[in-house]
Image (cartoon, rainbow, N blue to C red):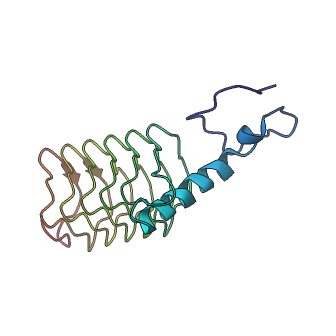
Amino acid sequence: NLAGTNLTGVNLQGADLSNTILTPDEADPLASLEECVRAHEAWVASSGRAGQRAVLAGRQLIGMNFAGRDLSGADLSGAVMTDAQILGTVFTNAIMQRTKMRSAEAKGGQFSGANLTEADFTDASATAAVFIHATLVKTVFRSTEMPGANFTRANAGGSAFWGELARVQGL
């Protein structure tokens, strides 16, 4: 019986909850996450007049699929997005300090203007990702695939880059 239990930040992906008593709001955490993203996209599309800004700070978003979604301006600080599918996802001006995107598929991701201070892209694929004007202070790019990535006017002070940077723009 989990009725009334606060499941904020709990990763239930793959858990068998078939014999668990839950209140309706807690019954499908993935559905509530989808509702949050949809409300956020409405907020972005309406310039804040409709919907609601997504605040996913500290959430366990391991393996989640946000491919092609618009999370501009969302607060994902401290979120764990390991193995997440974020191909072509728009994170323009998002707050992503200390976000862990290890082994994430971020090809074509739009991170322009995002605050990625102390974020971790270890083993991620960021091919053709755009980091124009992003704050990347102390961000880790260890074994990150980045051909065609654009770092024009990004603040990458103290960041750690391991691997080939020959085809990266702006660094």
Q: Position of residue 134 (x, y in %)?
A: 21, 57
Q: Residue at x 69, y 25 (%)?
A: 5
Whether residue 89 can be seen here: no
Would residue 108 be visible to someone looking at this image? yes
**How many badges with numbers are in the image?**
0
Rendered residue at 34%/47% (across/down): 96
* Quarter of the figure that contains the N terminus: top right
User: In this rendering, is residue 4 above or below 94?
Assistant: above
Q: Nearer the viewer, residue 46 or 85?
A: 46
x, y percentage for residue 10?
Answer: 60, 34
Please tell me in which quadrant of the rendered image residue 2 appears: top right
Q: Does residue 62 sit above or below 167 in this rendering?
A: above
Q: Residue at x 53, y 40 (%)?
A: 60
Q: Position of residue 53 (x, y in %)?
A: 45, 52
- Quarter of the C terminus within the rendering: bottom left
Q: Quadrant of residue 7?
A: top right
Percent across and percent down for residue 18 are 85, 40
